[in-house]
Amino acid sequence: MKNSVQLIAVGGMLCSLLAAGAFVITAKAQSRPAPGPIAEPNVKLNVQRSSGTCPQTVGLWWILLPYEGGAEHTVVADTRAFADTTKLVSSNNQQMVEFVAPLRSNYASCVGKTRQQEYTFYNVEFKNKQAYFRVDLRKINAPAQKITYKTVTASRPYVRWAIAD
């Protein structure tokens, strides 16, 4: 009986130590700062220059939120790398949207465009001292896709679009 009591006491102390250890581990895991926003664009579109001085790439922040049967996409073009302002200029039946940004003087001579085989629905064209950023969902072979929101935020084009089976 005495051994049983000692065993129970030792077992209780071990459980307390394990619980305390789990609390410390949990507390340490929770004390880490939460991951912040994506500081750098996570997609780079290469610029094919025809003439003038052009940026080598155009960065995009592209975030995908999948759901059953489809996904919601949010894309922000980093036009601030070569232009100070951007404005929404056209939109077509929730399938296409275009923004224009006057180029800074160091890129004003740029004539070129992005050439991506993987992301054909994102396009940036440089001409006439301006950059034109387009999201064109007509280039996606899927039964249903549409632009659900478009604006300029922090002087950058911001587009949210959805695709479904």
Image (spheres, rainbow, N blue to C red):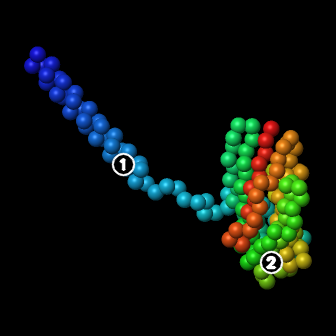
Specify the amino acid type for callout 1.
Ala
Secondary structure under badge 2? loop
Q: Is residue 43 or residue 33 the one in the foreground? A: 33
Q: Answer whether residue 48 is visible to the viewer in this image.
A: no
Callout 2 crowding tier (Cα within 10 Å): few <14, some 14–19, many ≥20: many
Comes first in the chain, label 2 or label 1: 1
The image shows residue 42 at horizontal and vertical percentages of 67, 57
Left or right: 104 with respect to 17? right
The image shows residue 72 at horizontal and vertical percentages of 72, 48
Figure quadrant of the N terminus: top left
Q: Residue at x 13, y 24 (%)?
A: 6
Q: Is residue 81 above or below residue 60?
A: below
Q: Nearer the viewer, mark 2 or mark 1?
A: 1
Left or right: 2 with respect to 107? left
Callout 1 crowding tier (Cα within 10 Å): few <14, some 14–19, many ≥20: few
Q: Residue at x 28, y 41 (%)?
A: 20
Figure quadrant of the C terminus: top right
Q: CA distance from mark 2 to mark 1?
A: 49 Å
Q: Answer whether residue 148 is visible to the viewer in this image.
A: yes
> Mark on residue 6?
none
Left or right: 144 with respect to 71? right
Q: Is residue 6 above or below residue 77?
A: above
Q: Is residue 80 above or below residue 37?
A: below
Q: Which residue is identified by label 2?
A: 103
Residue furthest top as drawn: 1
Task: Kindly indicate whether the residue at mark 1 contacts the one at mark 2 (C-beta within 8 angstroms).
Answer: no
Q: Which residue is identified by label 1?
A: 27
Number of numbered discs on residues? 2
Q: Quadrant of residue 106?
A: bottom right
Specify the amino acid type for callout 2.
Leu
Q: Residue at x 82, y 47 (%)?
A: 145
The image shows residue 122 at horizontal and vertical percentages of 82, 58
